[in-house]
DNA sequence: CCATCTTTGTGCACGCGTTCACAAAGACAT
DNA sequence: ATGTCTTTGTGAACGCGTGCACAAAGATGG
């Protein structure tokens, strides 16, 4: 799981709890699918099932946005798509830069889901001179030296980091200095940023380790001793 | 952020809270870095700073594993690395299959962080016959028809899904039927699985949308009306 | 052996998030 | 209009996670 920043008192932004914000994209996706099938209205029960959440939670989530439902009927799909999009800020265009166009960065650049919802790749940046000018997903890779001017010229406020871990903090510092205030970090490092800058991280190996923990638990559950303590492999 | 399954009462597995489990990989990473620098001991304060968490939280997290610290001194780095590795199940080998070797799947296969910590890519699977046999990250891509035999032969319990969204549920069903009990899903879909199967998801576009929400909030904070409600663009 | 100093381990309080359960609202039929 | 039926919106209770603050533990020096 990618989590938000640490040193923040779980800001209830404009009254909308953080946990709710994190679910809005999920609802939006389900609603968009319904919209494409021209379904006019949907009940909290149906939508909750599609989004994989509890229906009471969904209703409470929506109640933070306002009273958009009709009792006895449900929610108007199109209207809700619009309201959630607006709430998430997807009615405007968000230019994004991707830094580090290696295996992962190139895959991200090729990802269609980007453009679909208000996000536009403003530039691809890499420190490798050999990459400069090469086309990736139809865009030329620009040299990292152009970072500051690109961010300024395109009013970029969101940066995606797909560099090796060792370069991530330096890239972050430059992005922040240039005016970026939201960062999505794929490198396995803890980033330090000033107040007012949001960082979210996506960390494959953390996810796998969490799965391994539960997997181990499942395996040992019905087999070995309930308390799996090893006496003392190493003295403290 | 990738989150865990929904329909589970936040299982406090063997007394270790889920939130703690999610942080253990973070501590482990910081500790491994210290270990490589041959640092013998570390205080909760230092380690917490390196992991980007509150020191009291870190101490409480460790207290669930046992009393591994020494008052007045701190924690033995090597010993803690071992204890956390064992707790997370990283002392054993976890064979993993990756399904869907497109842009993202190939990037994942090339990812070094996989092998580093107990995870071994047992096979790469794709439905495209044109890909079969091609080498990706030194491994031949196998056809999806071999899924069942590969999972069985290699005792695979963890599967990574990097197929298009439309194929994800079908792939999931086959993985689960073949014996996989943990799934890491990169496709933007809600997966339905039987009890006992864990699903974690990594969703780029959700992360971006959450960032966009806060970004919009920052932008509108000092500018427009404090309560940003638009009167009525669409009647209910 | 005692004093001092550092750092752990945890009791406690508080706030957020989740879920149940139900009254109120509205649609729809008669 | 009135009654019935469906579904929303939310009050209330509960549990989990967080962080403060401090007593206890142990190291270290004299
Ligand atoms: N590949 C994956 O599936 C995957 C999964 C999870 C995490 N990650 C992480 O994502 C990051 C990228 O992974 P990858 O496999 O694409 O690595 P990669 O080596 O293929 O690509 C890294 C790119 O970053 C560029 N780079 C290096 N320093 C830079 C700098 N200072 N400024 C700008 N660009 C710079 C390099 O030139 C290279 O093109 C790594 O931190 C990795 O741990 C990757
Ligand atoms: N590329 C990214 O950065 C990115 C980011 C976030 C999410 N995603 C998601 O990850 C998934 C993969 O993205 P991608 O860019 O690699 O797509 P892609 O089209 O490049 O690759 C998909 C691969 O899956 C294979 N496939 C299709 N159906 C299959 C099936 N039934 N069984 C096995 N293999 C099958 C295809 O042959 C193809 O090789 C998508 O769901 C995408 O939305 C991608």
Image: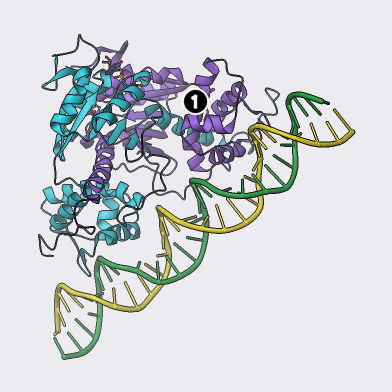
Chain colours: A purple, B cyan, C green, D yellow
Residue A164 image position (x, y, % from top left): 21, 32
The 10 Å Cα crowd at callout 1, few under 14, some 14 to 19, many 20 or more, is many
In the displayed structure image, the side of residue B203 where residue D12 appears, left or right: right
Q: Which residue is mark 1?
A: A30
Q: Going 36% across and 42% down the picture, which residue do you hit?
A: A193
In the displayed structure image, the side of residue A37 where residue A158 appears, left or right: left
Relative vertical location of residue A11 with respect to residue B67 in this rendering, above or below: above
Residue A187 image position (x, y, % from top left): 26, 34
Residue A46, picture quadrant = top right
Residue A58 image position (x, y, % from top left): 55, 37
Instruction: Return the residue nearer the eye: A126 or A214.
Output: A214
| Quarter that holds the N terminus of chain B | top left
Instruction: Return the residue nearer the eye: A111 or B190.
Output: B190
Q: Going 18% across and 17% down the picture, which residue do you hit?
A: A130
Instruction: Return the residue nearer the eye: C21 or B187.
Output: C21
Relative vertical location of residue A1 with respect to residue A178 in this rendering, above or below: below
Residue B128, picture quadrant = top left
* Element marked by disc 1: helix
Q: Going 17% across and 52% down the picture, which residue do you hit?
A: B81
Relative vertical location of residue A145 with respect to residue B54 in this rendering, above or below: above
Residue C30 image position (x, y, % from top left): 81, 25
**Residue A103 visible in the shown view:** no
| Quarter that holds the C terminus of chain B | top right
**Residue A7 visible in the shown view:** yes
């Amino acid at each position: 799981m990618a989590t938000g920043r640490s040193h923040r008192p779980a800001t209830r932004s404009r009254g909308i709890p953080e946990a709710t914000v994190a679910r809005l994209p999920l609802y939006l996706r389900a609603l968009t699918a319904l919209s494409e099938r021209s379904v006019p209205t949907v009940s909290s029960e149906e939508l909750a099932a599609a989004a994989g959440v509890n229906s009471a939670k969904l209703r409470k989530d929506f109640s933070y946005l306002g009273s958009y439902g009709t009792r006895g009927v449900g929610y108007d799909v199109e209207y809700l798509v619009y309201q959630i999009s607006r709430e998430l800020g997807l009615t405007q265009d968000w230019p994004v830069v991707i830094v580090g166009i290696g295996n992962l960065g190139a895959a991200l650049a090729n990802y269609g889901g980007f453009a679909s919802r208000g996000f536009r790749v403003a530039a691809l940046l890499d420190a490798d001179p050999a990459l400069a000018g090469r086309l990736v997903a139809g865009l030329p890779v620009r040299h990292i030296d152009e970072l500051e001017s690109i961010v300024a010229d395109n009013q970029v406020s969101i940066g995606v980091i797909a560099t090796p871990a060792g370069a991530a903090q330096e890239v972050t510092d430059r992005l922040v200095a240039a005016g970026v205030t939201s960062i999505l970090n794929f490198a396995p490092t803890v980033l330090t940023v000033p107040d007012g800058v949001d960082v979210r991280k996506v960390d494959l190996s953390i996810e796998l380790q969490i799965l391994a923990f539960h997997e181990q638990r499942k395996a040992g559950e019905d087999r070995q001793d309930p308390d799996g303590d090893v006496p003392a492999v190493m003295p403290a």
